[in-house]
Image (cartoon, rainbow, N blue to C red):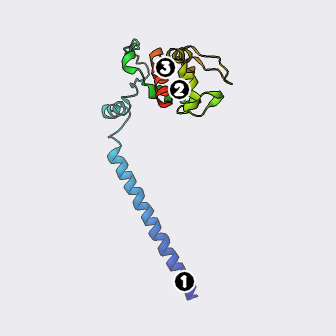
Amino acid sequence: MSRDQKFFDMYSLVIGVLAAFALAIFVLAMKMSDLTQGVYTRDAAEFQAAVEERIRPVGQVYLPGEEQAAAAPTVETLPEPDPVATAMTGPQVYNAACNACHGNGVGGAPITGDVAAWEPRIAQGIDVLNDHAINGFDGDAITPMLAKGGRADLSDQEVIDAVAYMVEESQ
């Protein structure tokens, strides 16, 4: 029986310590609640200021019954970019538009750097090459040359610079 008594005593001691610990936590929580309860209440000016500060980049705080007239929308006009300053160079146009076909010969396009494929075209003259590049060309190739390589946003001068680049690389 003494074993049972030792177990009961030890069990009672553990339960008592845990109960005292829980009571201490409860008392501490109540004390902290009393100390901090008055600091932040919804109606306190300090609480309202903290909320406004947190959401200031997003909007304003309006309590029920408060209204504010919506601000008139403003239209911001951006200056038109200078076309001369944004013009691409021949190699840039080639990489952006021409390389898709002339880089690997898609649809029968002459590959840039292939001298044999470019000789008969160069022999026609640079004006003919520029005209075909700007306006398109339905030659004997499988796929026709699209006007400006399919990039209508390119200026004629940008296309001419790209043609000059391809001719220079293919001589």
Helix, strand or loop for disc 2: helix
Helix, strand or loop for disc 3: helix
Q: Nearer the viewer, residue 83 or 11?
A: 83
Helix, strand or loop for disc 1: helix
Image location of residue 56, percent across then percent down? 36, 29
Quadrant occupied by the N terminus: bottom right
**Sequence order check, earlier mark of 2 and 3:** 2
Q: Which residue appears at 58% of the width and 23% of the height?
A: 120
Does 49 appear above or below 13? above
Tag 2: residue type?
Ala
Residue identified by numbered label 3: 159
Q: Nearer the viewer, residue 109 or 16?
A: 109
Q: CA distance from mark 2 to mark 3?
A: 9 Å
Q: Residue furthest bottom?
A: 2
Q: Which residue appears at 39% of the width and 11% of the height?
A: 72
Tag 1: residue type?
Gln
Image check: 77 left or right of 97?
Answer: left
Q: Are marks 1 and 2 in contact (CB under 8 Å)?
A: no
Residue identified by numbered label 2: 97
Does 165 appear above or below 10? above
Task: Please say whether residue 85 is visible from this viewpoint.
Answer: yes
Q: CA distance from mark 1 to mark 3?
A: 101 Å
Tag 3: residue type?
Val
Residue identified by numbered label 1: 5
